[in-house]
């Protein structure tokens, strides 16, 4: 009788068309772990950028108030309200309620930022003139007697927006770091 070769199959010779349940569970676990790790970084980055946005917009609101005061030759008020519904707005008719949309205007144009635009930023501290307002004088654009500061925080970092009696505006960091801003 002729001898024939017998072929014994091994697991290496078999090709499977899909993944096993164990492989799928492992891949999903790794993907879930990566998502959790990156989400905290994404949230921290979002808070950082929102605080930076508030600082820049508040700074330019102050500069706009000073410019408009000199340009119109009349006092311009920067109203700042604290709390969960914080806001910063300009008005050319004295103090106003910046929590009400449209209540504060300069030359019939609303200049306002609020907590609704920056939900991850709060305003824990205000030390400004009467009624939490900075008033820029229409003659020279100074804030004599109405100067002060506002502190904005995102939980990780805290920055102070300062207006001097001469009307100069600057930003410094009380806690954390943010680009080129110096420590207070």
Image (tube, grey):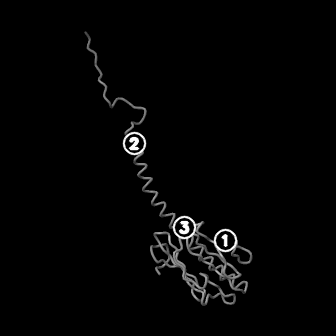
Q: Position of residue 165 (x, y in %)?
A: 58, 89
Side of 121 relative to 33 (left or right): right
Q: Earlier in the sequence, mark 3 or mark 1?
A: 3
- CA separation in Å, label 3 and label 1: 22 Å
The secondary element bearing badge 3 is classed as helix
Neighbor class of circle 2 (other Cα within 10 Å; few <14, some 14-19, many 20+) is few
**Which residue appears at 42% of the width and 56% of the height?**
37
Residue 29 versus residue 127 in the image, above or below? above
| Contact? badges 3 and 1 (CB < 8 Å) | no
Q: Which residue does the numbered mark 2 point to in the structure image? A: 25
| Image quarter hosting the N terminus | top left
The secondary element bearing badge 2 is classed as helix
The secondary element bearing badge 1 is classed as loop
Disc number placed over residue 50 in the picture, else none? 3
Q: Position of residue 87 (x, y in %)?
A: 60, 73
Q: Position of residue 22 (x, y in %)?
A: 37, 39
Neighbor class of circle 3 (other Cα within 10 Å; few <14, some 14-19, many 20+) is some
**Which residue appears at 66% of the width and 71% of the height?**
100
Q: Which residue does the numbered mark 1 point to in the structure image? A: 100
Side of 36 relative to 143 (left or right): left
Which of 103/164 is in front?
103
Neighbor class of circle 1 (other Cα within 10 Å; few <14, some 14-19, many 20+) is few
Label 3 or label 1, whichever lies nearer to me, is 1
Label 2 or label 1, whichever lies nearer to me, is 1
Residue 104: name its quadrant: bottom right
Q: Earlier in the sequence, mark 3 or mark 2?
A: 2
């Amino acid at each position: 009788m002729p001898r024939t070769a017998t072929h014994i199959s091994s697991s290496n010779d078999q090709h499977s068309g899909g993944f096993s349940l164990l492989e799928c569970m492992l891949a999903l676990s790794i993907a879930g772990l990566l998502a959790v790790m990156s989400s905290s970084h994404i949230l921290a980055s979002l808070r950082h950028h929102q605080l930076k946005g508030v600082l820049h917009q508040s700074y330019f609101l102050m500069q706009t108030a000073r410019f408009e005061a000199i340009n119109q030759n009349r006092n311009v008020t920067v109203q700042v309200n604290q709390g969960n519904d914080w806001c910063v707005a300009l008005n050319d008719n004295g103090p106003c309620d910046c929590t009400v949309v449209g209540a504060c205007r300069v030359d019939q144009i609303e200049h306002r930022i609020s907590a609704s635009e920056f939900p991850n930023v709060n305003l824990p501290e205000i030390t400004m003139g009467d009624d939490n307002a900075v008033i820029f004088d229409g003659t020279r654009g100074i804030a004599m007697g109405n100067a002060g500061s506002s502190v904005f925080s995102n939980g990780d970092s805290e920055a102070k927006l300062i207006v001097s009696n001469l009307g100069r505006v600057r930003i410094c960091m009380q806690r954390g770091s943010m680009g080129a801003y110096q420590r207070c």
